Each structure stands twice: as C-alpha cells, then as structure tokens.
C-alpha cells in the first residue's frame, strides 16, 4: 500500500510562510481547471468538500434527511483527503463549498486567496474536546508532553486544526515543537501507518481513536484539547468570494438548511450518527458511541480572533487579517 505521507517541512519551508504551501496547491489546481471557468458559476449541483470527520455533519444530515432538497438545493458531498487541500479544490471549482479548518482558511486568506466563510459547522466544547487525542502506537511510551520530543507525529494536514492545537498545547507545557518531527498523514491511512510503525503517534479524533484502540494498535498519549479547554470554531463552510457574490440566494438557502440540520445533529444522535458513518465510512457502532462536535451554523467574525492570535504566535501569518471581511454577512 502506498501511504500518503509527506516529509517533514524543513526549517526554510517553515520560514517561507505556511500559507504559501496552500497557495501553491491552489495555483497547481487552477492550472488544470482553466477550462472550467466558463461554467463555474452555473452548476445545478453543489459539491461540498470535507475531510472524513464528523465536523460537516450538518451538511451530511441535510442531504440524507432531504433538507437541502426541501430548500431547493441539490447538494453532494465530496471527500477530501487532507484539509489543507480544500482551498485549492474550491478555487479550481472541483467543489463549490468546502469545510476548511479555521487554521487552513486563515492561512489561505493570509496568502491572498479570495475565500469567504459563508456558514458555521462545528465548535469545540467541554463535552467533545475529549474526542481529540494524540494516539500513540505500541512500543512508544508517552507519560508527559516532553516525551513527544524526538518522536515522529502524523497530522492530517500540517498547520491544520489538530496540528496547530497540538503545537499550542506543547508550547503551554514548555515543550519546543521544533523538537517534534511532524509529518502529514490522512485520516483514512492512520490505522495502517500506526500499525506499520511509520509514525510514533498521530493527531486524530473519534471515532478513529476507539477503532484503533479496539484493534490493539496503541493507546491515547494525550487528550490535549481537554487541557486547552477552548470553545472556539473548528470547521466552517467557505467558498470563493466570486462564487458567493454571484450565488447570494443559494447561500441563503444553504444557511437555512444548515440551521435546520444542526438541530438534528445536536439533538438526534441516531440520525446524526447514520449520516456521519455513511460519509466517513466508519463503523456505525463506533460513531454512535461518540457524541459529534457541536454543530453551530452561525459564524461570527470575532470567532476567528483566537485562532489569529494563536497562529500569529506560531509565526504562521504574515499579514494583519480583518475578520469582518472574511465572513460573509
């Protein structure tokens, strides 16, 4: 099996600005999609791209429960391997709406990509922060944060949500994150990578944590999101500004449908779990055992402020971002 692992970014690449990596992905994608520009804004079916996590559950439920159709929309979900690929997919028109993490979106905006947040998806909460872990393979012992020094840690997107959060935790615990060897590992390949010893640990979330634990592949090394105790936005829905401005009526319908679907995600575990299991291809019993992150369809500009502060402290942003211009009114 060919594993989707990218080598650790060297120090020069880190200085180069993390947002440049996303910009390069976008330019490559645009180069092969120029022919699509003539039809980019006249598509009947809307493609929504998300990674294999429960965070886009509101869109999953809105499809499965016929909520989008009720609001006059035809929507289809498209799986994206690594979250940092979402901006490129949006601007190449492979998808019209994507679910980037706050960090991926802000990096893209910092790099000059004209994206705009159109609706909220999920937020952190005390109930679900325990879902986020650093899962450690057998043979590796992690008793405290400093034990991650010298270890190879896989993240589903370097400088994406889980990675940035973990780095924030390391810094707060007095550990230099530069002494940890981070590599990219997609969610679908994590179990195989852990089993083969390709990495010492992965930054992941439920239900994958329980699945790997039950398979005897290792154990939880840290529940770092619990210790950080934040309630900030995780993932939200975004589009290109051009598409958003040309499809204002569609976005209103999309928002209305998400508001209705969010009620189901937050209050009907059965329906939410069925939709999540269907899209993520995780066993339904594992999905049901873990409450999904809270669905919050409304996104306010100020909800991005903490992430900007954290990313700036990690030298991930080169410009001063105006949150009021990043969220569609």
Image (tube, helix red, strand yellow):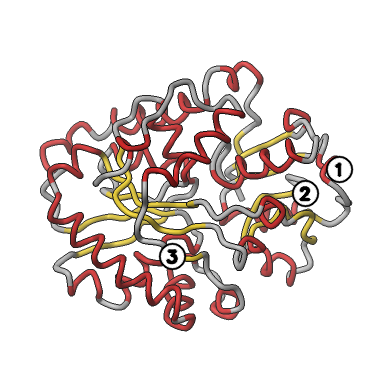
| Secondary element at tag 1 | helix
Give the side of residue 177 with respect to residue 303, left or right: right
Where in the figure is residue 163, as x and y percent of width and height?
A: 62, 42
Between 159 and 309, which is closer to the camera in this rendering?
309
Residue at point 82% right, 44% down? Answer: 145
Between 121 and 100, which is closer to the camera in this rendering?
121
Specify few, some or many for label 3: CA neighbours under 10 Å numbering under 14, 14-19, or 20 or more. many
| Secondary element at tag 2 | loop
The residue pinned by badge 1 equals 147
State which mark lies toward you, 1 or 3.
3
Residue at point 54% right, 34% down? Answer: 309
The residue pinned by badge 3 equals 295
Give the side of residue 18 with respect to residue 250, left or right: right
Query: Label 1, label 3: how many angstroms apart (C-alpha)?
Result: 34 Å
Q: Which mark is residue 197?
A: 2
Residue 70, quarter of picture: bottom left
Where in the figure is residue 140, as x and y percent of width and height?
A: 86, 50
Q: Is residue 19 above or below residue 60?
A: above
Residue 58 visible to the viewer: yes
Residue 207 visible to the viewer: no
């Amino acid at each position: 099996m060919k594993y989707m692992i990218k080598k650790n970014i060297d120090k020069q690449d880190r200085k180069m600005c993390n947002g440049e990596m996303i910009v390069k992905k976008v330019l490559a994608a645009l180069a092969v999609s120029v022919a699509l520009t003539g039809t980019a804004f006249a598509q009947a079916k809307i493609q929504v791209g998300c990674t294999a996590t429960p965070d886009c559950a509101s869109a999953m439920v809105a499809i499965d429960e016929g909520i989008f159709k009720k609001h006059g929309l035809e929507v289809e979900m498209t799986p994206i391997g690594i979250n940092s690929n979402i901006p490129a997919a949006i601007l190449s028109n492979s998808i019209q709406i994507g679910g980037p993490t706050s960090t991926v979106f802000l990096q893209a905006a910092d790099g000059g990509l004209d994206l705009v947040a159109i609706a909220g998806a999920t937020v952190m909460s005390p109930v679900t922060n325990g879902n986020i872990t650093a899962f450690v393979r057998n043979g590796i012992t992690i008793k405290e944060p400093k034990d991650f020094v010298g270890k190879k840690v896989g993240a589903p997107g370097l400088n994406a949500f889980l990675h940035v959060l973990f780095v924030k935790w390391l810094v707060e615990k007095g550990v230099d994150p530069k002494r940890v060897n981070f590599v990219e590992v997609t969610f679908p390949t994590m179990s195989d990578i852990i089993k083969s010893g390709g990495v010492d640990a992965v930054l992941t979330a439920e239900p994958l944590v329980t699945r790997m634990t039950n398979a005897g592949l290792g154990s939880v090394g840290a529940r770092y999101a619990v210790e950080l105790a934040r309630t900030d936005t995780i993932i939200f829905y975004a589009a290109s500004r051009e598409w958003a401005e040309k499809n204002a009526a569609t976005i209103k319908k999309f928002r209305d449908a998400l508001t209705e679907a969010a009620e189901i995600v937050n209050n009907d575990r059965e329906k939410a779990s069925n939709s999540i299991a269907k899209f993520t291809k995780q066993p339904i019993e594992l999905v049901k055992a873990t409450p999904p992150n809270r669905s919050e369809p409304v996104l306010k500009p100020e909800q991005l402020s903490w992430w900007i502060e954290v990313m700036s402290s990690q030298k991930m942003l080169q410009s001063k971002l105006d949150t009021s211009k990043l969220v569609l009114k």
